[in-house]
Image (cartoon, coloured by chain):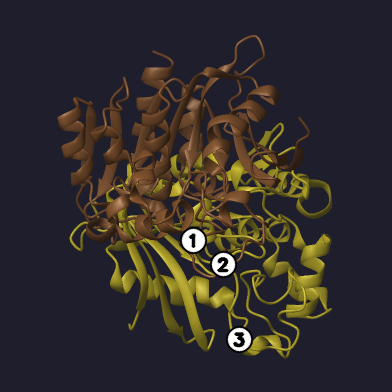
Chain colours: A brown, B yellow
């Protein structure tokens, strides 16, 4: 596994670094960030949480702005931060709007030309990135959680509900819970998956729950009530209803005054680390 | 006092915002960031710490990357984050190198043409920014501390040693402690203050201590031993010697493995907030 190290820094006693590698799934160079806490060793590998950022972000954003590293260090857990899309594919249209293409991979495998050649963040996240990182870092892939924000919250929920065998704990900040019915999701799914909506259900947390997919743990979601995307793009009531119908344990917390920014995320990041630690280290 | 609000967000129960105003000192529009904790009211204004970022940074950097807001909220203290230089002055040469001009104001008043027209961050920081922010926010200017990183650490030390009546507590991360003898400082002082070094002593923490300026509180400095600028630009042993000779209380902590980045700052930010709180709220 050939990794290129772009930078490494000691932080909170552990090590945070930014790396790239040649991705087979994406057929491109892919970048990611990783935090490994001080106590991690080959003999005693630590649990890991993959963190997924939202539209326009990259592999540095969540680690830099969420304040989460401190709490990962306190709980002795690793963090892996994927990029939000392939980069450098030169797919026609990938740089024309901020909610499609670069920075907007939606953590799925595109089925439509010309996107399907490189836009395979779904398989990259489920298979390749865990394999690459667990080969080089002292982290325990049997105790792997997932967390995300906005588009990344969508990614975390969908991956955890689809593959609870891979993702043992899950939480989200202001996630897109029902992309099939909101503008961001409709545009992305039409572009990447095509206009036939039958293929969309596998990529929508609310529809996955409705179809009987559940996660054995409680899903934690934090949502700001002053989020500028709440009514049009996020609509958390959909997952609330679907979870209740499916018997899925869900803790959906609404916070007066908080918006969609990382200032919101950093205010509640500690609780998310505790949530994952209680499951992965419990 | 006409402020333009660029954004405001609830964070850790308080409010963080980014603002601009027409600065009289700079004769330009100036931007700053502010965090006001939840408990601050006009009747019970809170202490405030001004945070000064380093070369190439702006008024958002320290608040976004240091993780400090959380601890300010916990201690019930406000934060004000100045920009690192004037912006938009079109001073010849201000955009030619990253360590002079834009992003590199060194928190002093230039005496040399063409810089002296706008490069007046010294007076801006001592007089105008406190006046502007204390007029509009519920903060207590009689309990005002200062903290900075690298060039901002230089700024914090120099302002606190020069005007302990204005700045009641002081700390720094990886500061330039003796700019008169290191490349960054020599270049900046020659540019802004001219080649006659007699005028430099008022802008150099080590020389201020040597000249008898002290601060009534302990100065807290954190320095990473793996800092890439340690030997050439920072040279903390100068302030250690000068403080000892001057009878200045100094807590200089060296940290193995830590570099010059905000990953270092965020690892020790909590201790700095405790340091300022103990003085300003003690």
Residue B226 in view: no
Are the two marked residues, 1 and 2, in contact with CB atoms closer than 8 angstroms?
yes
Query: Decide: marks 1, 3 in contact (CB < 8 A)?
Result: no
Q: Quadrant of the C terminus of chain B?
A: top left
Q: Neighbour class for label 1 at 10 Å: few (<14), some, many (≥20)?
A: many
- Please check whether the numbered discs 1 and 3 fall on a single chain: no
> Along the polypeptide, which appears first: circle 1 or circle 2?
2
Q: Residue at x 39, y 25 (%)?
A: A169
Q: Secondary structure at mark 2?
A: loop
Q: Please name which of the two marks, 1 or 3, marks the residue nearer to the observer.
A: 1
**Residue at horizontal 30 percent and vertical 30 percent from the top:** A219
The residue that mark 1 highlights is A100
Image mark 1: chain: A
Residue A85 position in % (x across, y down): 56, 51
Chain at tag 2: A
Report the quarter where the N terminus of chain B lies.
Answer: bottom left
């Amino acid at each position: 596994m050939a990794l290129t190290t772009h930078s490494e820094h000691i932080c909170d006693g552990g090590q945070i670094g930014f790396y790239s590698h040649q991705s087979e799934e994406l057929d491109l160079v892919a970048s990611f960030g990783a935090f490994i806490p001080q106590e991690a060793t080959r003999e005693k590998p630590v649990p890991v949480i993959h963190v997924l950022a939202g539209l326009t972000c990259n592999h540095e954003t969540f680690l830099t702005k969420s304040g989460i590293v401190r709490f990962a260090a306190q709980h002795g857990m690793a963090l892996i931060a994927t990029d939000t899309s392939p980069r450098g594919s030169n797919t026609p249209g990938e740089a024309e709007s901020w909610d499609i293409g670069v920075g907007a991979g939606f953590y799925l495998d595109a089925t439509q030309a010309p996107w399907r050649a490189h836009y395979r963040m779904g398989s990259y996240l489920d298979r390749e990135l865990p394999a690459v990182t667990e080969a080089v870092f002292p982290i325990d892939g049997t105790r792997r959680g997932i967390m995300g924000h906005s588009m990344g919250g969508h990614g975390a929920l969908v991956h955890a509900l689809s593959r609870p065998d891979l993702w043992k704990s899950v939480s989200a900040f202001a996630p897109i819970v029902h992309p099939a019915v909101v503008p961001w999701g409709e545009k992305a799914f039409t572009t990447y998956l095509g206009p036939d909506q039958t293929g969309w259900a596998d990529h929508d947390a609310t529809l996955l729950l409705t179809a009987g997919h559940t996660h054995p743990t409680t899903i934690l979601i934090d949502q700001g009530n002053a989020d500028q995307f709440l009514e049009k793009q996020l609509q958390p009531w959909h997952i609330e209803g679907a979870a209740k119908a499916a018997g899925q344990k869900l803790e959906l917390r609404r916070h007066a005054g908080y918006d969609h920014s990382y200032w919101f995320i950093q205010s509640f990041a500690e609780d998310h680390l505790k949530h994952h630690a209680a499951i992965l280290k419990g």
